[in-house]
Amino acid sequence: AQSVSQHNHHVILSEAASLELGCNYSYGGTVNLFWYVQYPGQHLQLLLKYFSGDPLVKGIKGFEAEFIKSKFSFNLRKPSVQWSDTAEYFCAVTPNNNNDMRFGAGTRLTVKP
Amino acid sequence: GAGVSQSPSNKVTEKGKDVELRCDPISGHTALYWYRQRLGQGLEFLIYFQGNSAPDKSGLPSDRFSAERTGESVSTLTIQRTQQEDSAVYLCASSLFSRGFYEQYFGPGTRLTVT
């Protein structure tokens, strides 16, 4: 079955540490890739997205993600996290020809001040 | 403009009762989605509406679940004879069009607790 895997359930970092959250998917063919973030008490919101072109995508708040087609991966990175990055992060994938968006289980990030 | 709104924000119901959850999408968005998020799990697709086309109901877990949408406006998700395993946050999202590369905008969710 098609799936999206996020390897880390809960990540705890200190401020200024570097972040990488893993995301792998099992769809074949052309896909669209997304990272959504849910800050405590807030709605899910889009962090960044990849459709085509440069596989290194830059999003809001200093986040970036790299699409590696050969590895079916779309890992999220940030060079230096802040306490305000504490949130839950969801990777999502849709095949290019439909809107069947599948989400990973999410990774909870806790940044210690 | 206003974002996606959902009501109620919280709902506690007894096992066996029916519940109705409401979603108001962003004005002009033709696509509307319902998801379920159980504690500690990812978002589970339930149903999708695109304009006046027949909805994609492939994610509905049982025939106790149904949803309606009139045109490109409000949608309601109904769960009949609720069970404890229906306890979850139900999220609604809308997007401008239904193609996969259009961003989905999420509402705050309805937290359903079945006692």
Image (tube, coloured by chain):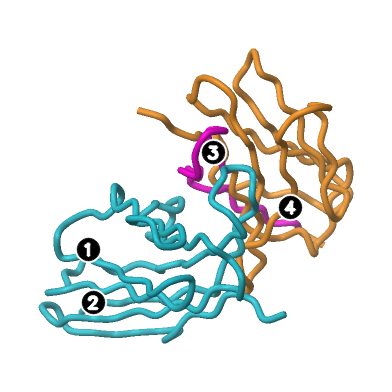
User: Bounds of the magenta span?
Assistant: A92-111
- Which label sits in the foreground, 4 or 1? 4
* Percent position of residue B78, x then y: 25, 74
Proximity of marks 4 and 3: CB atoms separated by less than 8 Å: no
* Percent position of residue A64, x then y: 81, 40
- Which label sits in the foreground, 3 or 1? 3
- Which label sits in the foreground, 4 or 3? 3
A49 on left or right of A61? left
Examine the structure image and report whether residue B96 is included in the region drawn in magenta. Answer: no
Q: Which residue is mark 1?
A: B85
Write the residue at 47% across / 76% down: B73
Q: The residue tagged with tag 1: helix, strand or loop?
A: helix
**Residue A71, located in which quarter of the rendered image?**
top right
The label on residue B114 is 2
- Which hue belongs to chain B? cyan
The disc, 1 or 2, on the residue closer to the chain's N-terminal end is 1
Query: Is the N terminus of chain B in the top left, top right, bottom left or bottom right quadrant?
Result: bottom right
Amino acid tagged 3: Thr
Q: Which residue is mark 4?
A: A47
Amino acid tagged 1: Glu
Q: Which residue is mark 3?
A: A94
* Percent position of residue B42, x then y: 46, 50
- Relative to residue B91, is residue A19 depicted above or below? above
Q: The residue tagged with tag 3: helix, strand or loop?
A: strand
Amino acid tagged 2: Val
Proximity of marks 2 and 4: CB atoms separated by less than 8 Å: no
Query: Is the C terminus of chain B in the top left, top right, bottom left or bottom right quadrant?
Result: bottom left
- Relative to residue A110, is residue B99 depicted above or below? above
